[in-house]
Image (cartoon, rainbow, N blue to C red):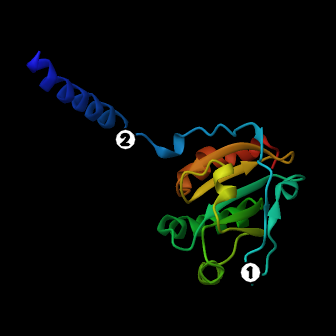
Amino acid sequence: MRVLFFALPLVLLAGLVAIFALTIDRDASLVRSVLIDKPAPQFVLPAVEGLAVPGFDTATLKGAPTLVNVFASWCIPCRDEHPLLEAIKDDIGIRIFGINHSDAPDNARAFLAELGNPYDAVGADRDRRVSIDWGVYGVPETFLVDANGTIVYKHVGPLTQKAIDTELKPAIAKLGG
């Protein structure tokens, strides 16, 4: 009985290590959102104070396909993907809305002034409530919303050129955009 008492924690630890080892190489961008093929959550985001673009809400997403990108000035991967967002804006021409996640307005404005502003609208999500409703794990995350306001695609982590070419562009093409 003593052997079982000492062996059981070791067996449980070995099991957890095995689970960790098997899942460590998984691509985080493959996390499927429960919101795919569901309407975007109901929300209203005010504009980032002092920014020359408006905030947005659920109704604003309707009418045309929209890329919704969750970003923050303090997010290093957001800086890495930012030039790709500007290229998407130039190359594809789709509307891009930004959810500024848990950021001070001064920092958000400085971030966009430094790197450029590819966003048609930027909503300030200072308390992270809207991000939570969208199922955001962390920044950056990007969603594609169709003209009816339905989320049809989600990318976790910074966009890469490969993800844009193999996932995002085909998803946009399916929408007729």
**Residue type for callout 2:** Asp
Q: In this rendering, would 121 be left or right of 29?
A: right
Q: Position of residue 66 (x, y in %)?
A: 78, 55
Give the numbered dot on residue 49.
Answer: 1
Mark in the foreground, 2 or 1: 1
**Residue ranking furthest to the top:** 1
> Quick one: label 2, few (<14), some, or many (20+) residues within 10 Å?
few
Toward which corner of the image does residue 104 lie, by quadrant? Answer: bottom right
The percent position of residue 6, horizontal first and vertical second, equals 13, 26
Q: CA distance from mark 2 to mark 1?
A: 40 Å
Disc 2 target residue:
25
Side of 93 relative to 82 (left or right): right
The kind of secondary structure element at disc 1 is loop
Secondary structure state at the residue bearing disc 2: loop
Q: In the rendered structure, which amino acid carries the disc numbered 1?
A: Glu
Question: In the rendered view of the protein, which quadrant contains the N terminus?
Answer: top left
Dot 1 alpha-carbon crowd within 10 angstroms: few under 14, some 14 to 19, many 20 or more: some
- Where residue 106 sits in the image (x, y, percent)? 63, 84
The disc, 2 or 1, on the residue closer to the chain's N-terminal end is 2
Q: Residue at x 66, y 79 (%)?
A: 105
Viewer-proximal residue among 82 and 150? 150
Q: Residue furthest front?
A: 1
Residue closest to the eye, 172 or 101: 101
How many numbered marks does the figure carry? 2
Residue 74 lies, in percent from the top left, at: 51, 72
Residue drawn at the location 49% of the way across and 64% of the way down = 77
Q: Is residue 141 left or right of residue 3?
A: right
Relative vertical location of residue 11 with respect to residue 154 in this rendering, above or below: above
Whether residue 39 is situated above or below residue 106 in the rendered picture: above
Left or right placement of residue 162 versus residue 170 in this view: left
